[in-house]
Amino acid sequence: MSDREGPRRPPGSGRRELADELARLAARPEVARALRLAQIQGLLGTPAVPLRAATPHTEGQPPASGEPAAISIWRPRREGGEIVFERPEPLPLGDHYAARRRFSGRPATGVRRLCFLGESVAAGYLLAPGLTPAQVLEAHLGHASDRPWEVIDLARTNETLPGLVETLRSVEQLAPEIIVVFAGNNFGLLETPALSPFSPSVEARQAYALALRDDGLAGPVKEARRRLGRLMENALAEVAALADAMGARVVWIVPE
């Protein structure tokens, strides 16, 4: 070996071996969650989620922030010194989102606020806008509590994990006490579309072929399950960190 080549690394210390070991450790749920939380807090470099400075939740007072940002398709605008969020007029046959045209950034005095996110079942697919889970939940909370509740319906059909987390990032502006996520039914279909021999991506088709070669027909299924598990771990860690930053409780409901 010439001096130019430098000292050899000890066996098992190459980047590939280190990466494999890290991947094996990160496959454990508790390790993946710890790594994700460390990334969100910026301990591993650039934070994965650009969190605004968190302040303790004060009922009726949105957390301190800069200029208001859109919440899904609801765009902010100032009206009489207050911030309201308004969506475009729904299409004649409806669209993927709740039909409610507008809601205020600040909860009304004495009203408790809950933000409701999710996919088709949460949006009341085929029954909306006449009847939605958010409407039913608001009615039940009103009967069960001595104070009124407002349920902000942010569910949409064909929701994905990245889309759900992106919406949740902006929910801080609404100062919710509780966040309900009603989702999970679509993730097996929508979160692994690239794992297919028909994917337009050459890299995706190669990954499918490798999984098929290594484990037969069960290979792509195992790989899809692994990818979905990793996506879910990351999303749950992110949701937990975001909710903690805004001082809200989270309830996640998985449809059958």
Image (tube, helix red, strand yellow):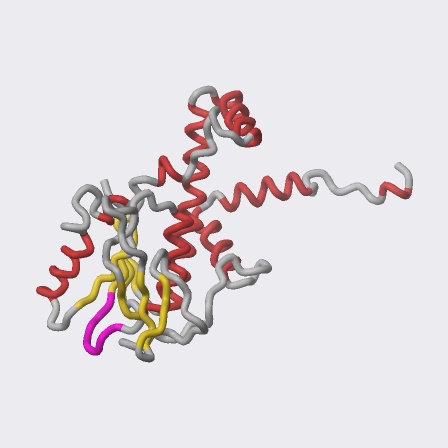
Is 194 a magenta residue?
A: no
Main SS of the magenta segment?
loop
* Left or right: 29, with 39 as reference point: left
* Left or right: 18, with 214 as reference point: right
Q: Residue at x 27, y 61 (%)?
A: 115
**Image quadrant in which the N terminus is located:** top right
Q: Residue at x 19, y 48 (%)?
A: 128
- Viewer-side residue, 45 vs 132: 132
Reply above or below: 188 against 163: above
Expressed as whole percent of the image width and height from the top left, the position of residue 171 reads: 35, 63
Expressed as whole percent of the image width and height from the top left, the position of residue 139 reads: 12, 60
Reply above or below: 75 against 63: above
Q: Tell me the quarter of the picture where residue 58 sits.
A: bottom left
Is 112 a magenta residue?
A: yes
Quick check: can you spot residue 243? Answer: no
* Left or right: 235, with 119 as reference point: right
- Viewer-side residue, 195 vs 7: 195
Residue found at the very far right of the displayed protein: 2
Tally of numbered discs: 0
* Left or right: 107, with 140 as reference point: right
Expressed as whole percent of the image width and height from the top left, the position of residue 180 reads: 27, 57
Q: Which residues are magenta?
A: 107-113
- Viewer-side residue, 256 vs 106: 106
Q: Residue at x 22, y 62 (%)?
A: 151
Quick check: can you spot residue 9? Answer: yes
Reply above or below: 217 against 81: above
Expressed as whole percent of the image width and height from the top left, the position of residue 148 reads: 15, 70
